[in-house]
Amino acid sequence: MEGTTAGVLSLIFPNPQNRLGYGFAVNDFFGFVPNATTVELFDANNFSLGSISADGIPDPDFVGGFLGVESTTPFVRAEVTFNDSRFAFDNLRYESVSQNVPEPTTLLGLATVLGCGTLLKRGNSQKQNKS
């Protein structure tokens, strides 16, 4: 847009991260905005791991969306660019996840909880039938 400058937000994380996501809105009343926001990730040596952009999609009240990215290489800094001088940034989410170790205990725990729930239901229905 003529007469505007992009906004840049630097995010520095205390520990290496693998996932990043955020919601955004831009000040555009004309609908679809290509490349409304871009995020570039950097490792601990300040080396760029690459960037990804997201389009702004019209919503009843604003033009925006959600950008989410997962990196196999941990990052410690993210440069978020908005291609409009007026923008909103919310719902920042980031986390460090292990890329090498599967989590079978989570599935086992879920199966155990579901199994106990089934046993409890079965036990309660048998008690009610005896009464």
Image: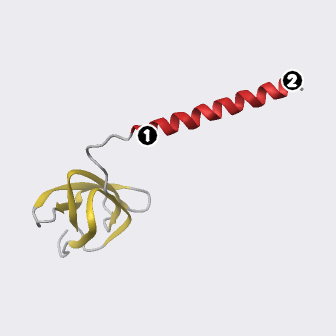
Q: Quadrant of the N terminus?
A: bottom left
Q: Position of residue 43 (x, y in %)?
A: 16, 62
Task: Identify the amino acid type marked 1.
Answer: Thr
Label 2, secondary structure: give it.
helix
29 vs 116, nearest the viewer = 116
21 vs 100, nearest the viewer = 100
Q: How many marks?
A: 2
| Residue that protrudes farthest toward the right in the picture | 131
27 vs 13, nearest the viewer = 13
Q: Which residue is mark 1?
A: 105
Can you see residue 56? yes
Q: On screen, 109 above or below 24?
A: above
The residue shown at (32%, 68%) is 27
Q: Position of residue 31 (x, y in %)?
A: 31, 57
Specify few, some or many for label 2: CA neighbours under 10 Å numbering under 14, 14-19, or 20 or more.
few
Q: On screen, 97 above or below 8?
A: above
Task: Identify the amino acid type marked 2.
Answer: Lys
Circle on res. 130: 2
The residue shown at (35%, 68%) is 89
The residue shown at (25%, 55%) is 54
Specify the quadrant of the image occupied by residue 57. Answer: bottom left
Q: Quadrant of the C terminus?
A: top right
Can you see residue 82? no
82 vs 31, nearest the viewer = 82
Left or right: 82 as drawn, with respect to 113: left
Q: Position of residue 129 (x, y in %)?
A: 84, 23
How far apart are labels 2 and 1 at the CA level? 37 Å
The residue shown at (45%, 41%) is 106
Label 1, secondary structure: give it.
helix
Specify few, some or many for label 1: CA neighbours under 10 Å numbering under 14, 14-19, or 20 or more.
few
Label 2 vs 1, first from the N-terminus? 1
Circle on res. 56: none
